[in-house]
Structures are given as C-alpha cells and as structure tokens.
Image (cartoon, rainbow, N blue to C red):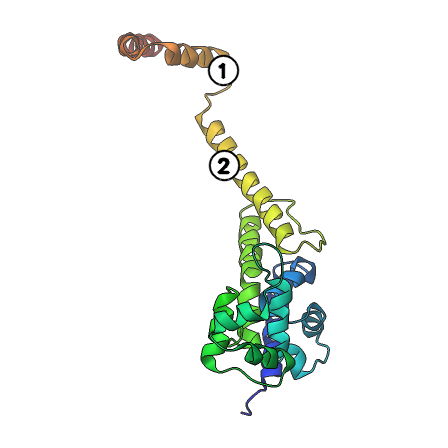
Amino acid sequence: MENITELEGVAAALAAVRAELEGLGHTLDVIPFGRLTYKTGIAESTIRKLFAGEPVSPDEVDPPFQDRLQFLLKTRLHPDGRPYSRPELAEAARVDRSMITNLLNGKRQPGFETSRDLAKHFKVPGFFSIGPEEALLAALEPVLEQARMLAELKGHQVERVALRGSTAGSDELARELNAAIHQVLTTAQAMRQTSEEPDDDPELRELTDTMRSLPASSRKGVMGALRSAVGLARNNDQG
C-alpha cells in the first residue's frame, strides 16, 4: 500500500468528520470555522475547502514557520492589548533580536528549543510541532463530542431537538444540548411525580393528604387504627 501524503491524510480525516456529523443529522454549519483557525493557524478558507473536497496547496494546510509566528503575533496579544515586541519575543525564546527578525522574514528556521519557547510564551504548546491533521482533529473533538451527546439524548425520547443553521458553530450545539438536557430532566421529574401521585379517587387523595399533614408520632397511631378499620371492612365484605 502506498503511503498517503500529509495533505491526503488531512483531507481523509476531515471527510471522516463530515461523514460522522452528517450521520448524526448535522451539517457543516455546526463547525466553528473561526475557532479552528484560531486553534490551528490554518486559514478558514483553507479549512472550508478541505471539508468541501476542493484542492489546496501543502503550504495552505501546513503554513511555514514565519506565517505561524506572524499569526500568533496578530491573535495572541499582550495582556494590555498590544502585540508583543520583538525584544519581548527574543527574551522569551532566549535568542537575540536579529534572530526574531530573521524568523519573521523567513530567512532563518528555528531549532527545537526556540520553537518550543515561543509556543510556551504564546501559551500554545505544540503549535509549531503538531501536524495539521492532529491539530484539526483536536480542535474538532469538542464539536464531535457535543454532536454525539445530542444524538444520544435524542435517542432517549428527546423530541424536537434539531440543529438550525448558525455561524455560531459549537455555541449553537451547546444551546441545543442545554435545551435537550433540560427536557430530559423535566420529563424525568414529571414521570417521578406521576408515579408518586395517588389514584384519581378524591377520597383516597384526601386520606393521603391528611396522613401527610400529621406529625410522625400521630401518624403511627392513626395507621394502627386504619389497619384495624381496613381489617374490619374486609371481614364485613366477606360476610
């Protein structure tokens, strides 16, 4: 068997995700494409092409280091809201400033420790080392988990739970899940209450309510008298 390329592997993995979602009754509208881009650094347009089975280039799926680093500079900002400076990156990566400049210009490639330190600085462990297939599947897993849970809830007689097209993606799934869980709990509570309710006989309901209103000490005495009365009534019926 021929080894598949990285690009073919990514395409096959996303085709499997799409097939699972469709099998669960969902469309691609539940996928938060913007979040996938934020997590992986792969452009949203590229991810959409992959899901659609359209051709993309290897660099689109696995951007070069300089593009990934520039992406982090734009999307992971300093706590005060500004981009990190090159001196700050140099300090974080324990290299000189010229190295950071060369990395951003694509004139140099980082060693393992430099890429690891930069990923740690931006709080994205593995961002430069994890392949695109693994990164995309990891970012998609929460969506698949929600879709599977929703399908399971629907299988437990949760009716009228249908995903509507929304660019909110997994946020929409979360809202539907909350509604489904609420419906399950409400139904279960209603079933418990029904099983605990006495028959529709008004006298039986009155007797039950009266017994519940009595203190525990008085209830024991009444129960004794009630048992005697029931026994007497049965004897009279038999006579």
**Looking at the image, which is closer to me, 77 or 42?**
77
Quadrant for the C terminus in the image: top left
Residue drawn at point x = 53 percent, y = 53 percent: 149
Horizontal and vertical percent position of residue 159? 62, 44
Which quadrant of the figure has residue 22?
bottom right
Horizontal and vertical percent position of residue 151? 57, 54
Horizontal and vertical percent position of residue 234? 33, 12
Could you tell me the amino acid type at mark 1?
A: Asp
**Looking at the image, which is closer to me, 202 or 125?**
125
Instruction: Reply above or below: 95 against 154.
Output: below
Tag 1 residue:
201
Residue drawn at point x = 51 percent, y = 38 percent: 185
Tag 2 residue:
188
Residue drawn at point x = 64 percent, y = 78 percent: 61
Circle 2 Cα neighbour tier, 10 Å, few/some/many (<14 / 14–19 / ≥20): few
Q: For this view, does 9 lie left or right of residue 91?
A: right
Helix, strand, or loop for circle 2?
helix
Could you tell me the amino acid type at mark 2?
A: Ala
Q: Is residue 154 visible?
A: yes
Helix, strand, or loop for circle 1?
loop
Horizontal and vertical percent position of residue 135? 55, 71
Cα separation, mark 2 vs mark 1, equals 24 Å
Residue drawn at point x = 68 percent, y = 74 percent: 50
Q: Is residue 125 visible?
A: no
